[in-house]
Amino acid sequence: MRILLTGAGGQLGMQFLQVDRGHQVIAAYHARQPEGWTGELLKIDLLDPASLREAVLSSSPDWIVHGAAMTNVDACERDPDAAMRANGAATGVLAEAARDAGARFLYVSTDYVFDGSDGPYREDSPVNPVQAYGRSKLEGERRALQADPRAVVARTSAVYGPHRSNFVTWLIGETRAGRPVRIAEDQWVTPTHTRDLVEQIHALIEHDARGIYHTAGAEGCSRLDFAKAACRTFGTPIDLVHPVKAADLPWLAPRPRDARLDTSRIARIKSPFSMAEGLIALAKETRS
């Protein structure tokens, strides 16, 4: 099977390239080429529809896993038009190109399509994003499913892993250096290790899935509890983790208060990692 992977230079993409399931993967990237990858490479630009169509045409994929996105939530709030082009319109272009080429399409989305007032959320729960990032990703979902009802939308949450900077690697770096950190005690997420997410994506492909799935860790928790669990796993000082209200953090865009994802649907085909399993896996990966 040939899989065109977008966002190959990001943390999800680099993890995807390390999981060998016997498929041919074409790694599509924009600014950051995936390190150490010796397979097929393509350079794309989410803001250039012609480059996206050409990538699909030239690679002849069986599946497209669309992980590339504008993911900086505050940057999206500052430039919502760019966010909508990168996350909404570009997804539509790729999904239509996949349909026309006879390829299946999987779109990696986010828990931020919910407003956070009533978590945990199921796949059929009402969506109501409260910031530009969530609105742009929801538009990507709409366009993917409009282009092909067989498309897969894989919503995830609080993704972390051994590649690139993320909440856990930042937290451990700060506390290991003896610097205090301020963490929201009133925001709930579903921590997701990139390897777990990659394995869930492969399970969806191999089971010929379609529609919306919540592809995240097995359990939700507050940001604060997640931070404390990470410190315990990595052996860094928990007393450097200071609880604050989300409203006291210097965020431009509002975040959903409780956007925990119910992962019971994906669990029927692949059991998600528990929070402890994910953190232990990361500790082992970063020691090697």
Image: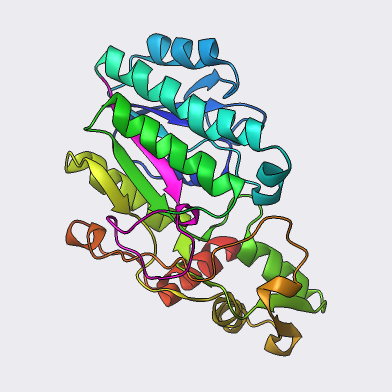
Residue 141 left/right relative to 75: left
Expressed as whole percent of the image width and height from the top left, the position of residue 98 reads: 33, 20
Q: Where in the figure is residue 154, as x and y percent of width and height? A: 35, 47
Residue 168 in view, yes or no? yes
Q: Is residue 238 left or right of residue 193?
A: right
Q: Is residue 204 above or below residue 44?
A: below
Task: Classify 109 as above or below 3.
Answer: below
Going by the image, does 57 lie left or right of 32? left
- 175 w.r.t. 286: above or below: below
Which residue does the image show at 60% across and 45% down from the upper left? 132
Q: Is residue 36 magenta?
A: no
The foreground one among 2 and 186 is 186
- Name the quadrant containing residue 196: bottom left
Taking depth in this image into account, of 234 and 121 the one nearest to the observer is: 121
Tell me what residue is drawn at x 39 percent, y 10 percent.
57
- Residue 7 appears in view: no
The dominant secondary structure in magenta is loop
Q: Position of residue 191 (x, y in %)?
A: 48, 66
Horizontal and vertical percent position of residue 204: 25, 45
* Location of the C terminus (image quadrant): bottom right
Q: Is residue 178 left or right of residue 4?
A: right
- Report the residue at 62% width, 26% height from top: 30
111 inside magenta stretch: yes
Along the line of sight, the residue nearer the viewer: 32 or 185: 185
Figure quadrant of residue 231:
bottom right
Using the image, determine if residue 194 lies above or below residue 49: below
Q: Which residues are magenta?
A: 103-127
